[in-house]
Image (cartoon, rainbow, N blue to C red):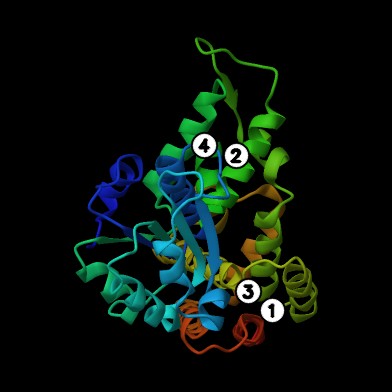
Amino acid sequence: MIIKAGAIATLLKRPDPAFSAFLLHGRDEGRIREAAQALVTVFLGAADDPFRLVRLTGSDLRDDPVCLADEAQAISMTGGDRVVQVRNIADTHSGAFETLFDNPNATAKVIVEAGELRKGSRLRKLFETLPQTAAMAFYEDNTQSLEELIEAELRAANLRISVDALAYLTSVLGEDRGITRQELAKLVTFMSGGGTRDAPLEVSLADVQSAIGDGNAVTLDQICDATFAGSSDVLAIELKRWNESGQNMISVIRSATNHALRLQLLMAQLGTGGDTEMVMRRARPPIHFSRVAAIRMQLRYWNQPKIKQALQLLLEAENHCKTTGYPEIAIAERVLFRIANAARA
């Protein structure tokens, strides 16, 4: 059964007893991890009992396709419900789940964490059509949900946030719920020592940039600026740093896409007769002072036809990362250097 986005929060708190297996899939790994842990807590309580919780991976299922069905029908030595949590699952593991659902003796709850699955994939179809299974999709926070998360996290720490600081945070966070919470925790720690429930301390744009401005967002900004300024040497250095840190290369492509969309919007505003400096000052979210010169230069290099072509290349690159099986770093480097070469052409 497909669980609509608006019903997911309720299900995670009070799962329907009729559901024996749950598929959590999508692009936001952080939200998927949170949801999986919420279900484990509902079924087993706060403490992980090794006799009642079994963790498997896609590699386990590949090596022994029937191990999932075996674990799902095993009985806990200490009594009580059992949970089988399965991570790193792809469409190629569908056979193991078909075996599981054919087993009438399986009594454990099964929680499955997968990446993004195309619509109509074998695994999604299996979980979306059976009455005893629930399929939930988790994608990046939209602006509204991200703002609500930020304000809720800060409110719990007796903090409130200014409008420009909130706009900045929503521009640099949101691709992964886990990373978003980590960055907000850093901000709360940075702001510690002030504010009460009745008089919360305000978080300013300067506070946000001081607390989290030296993390992934800055590196992504540097990659984007090097790409759209045509600085291939700088781009090579920044991509090497990003790749060596073990970060997801799709995040780089998405950040470049968002940057291109922003340049496109600024150029559209200039096309209506706006002054460059005025348009940049009025930009929302605000352009950080350290990037004003770089953005100004990029606006000279790019025009609407060129930026439209760059956007098409970036969208194709993200699709290739998800569908071709080629290394993400190779796909990202190819498209970004191609755009960098086009910047000053």
Give the mark toward the camera: 2 or 1: 2
Q: Position of residue 317 (x, y in %)?
A: 52, 83
71, 2: nearer the viewer:
71
Q: Which label is found at residue 228?
A: 3
**Contact, CB < 8 Å: mark 3 with mark 1?**
yes
Callout 2, which amino acid? Leu
Q: Secondary structure at mark 3?
A: helix
Between discs 4 and 3, the one toward the N terminus: 4
Amino acid at circle 3:
Phe
| Mark seen at residue 46 | 4
Q: Amino acid at mark 1?
A: Gly
Q: Residue 143, position in %: x, y?
A: 41, 49
Determine whether, in the image, residue 128 is placed left or right of residue 215: left
Residue 233 position in % (x across, y down) = 80, 79
Q: Which residue is depicted at the point 71% across and 68% down?
A: 246
Point out the frontmost of discs 1 and 4.
Answer: 4
The residue located at (69%, 79%) in the rendering is: 230
- Toward the top, the furthest residue is 198
Mark drawn on residue 184: 2
Mark on residue 230? 1
Q: Quadrant location of residue 330?
A: bottom right
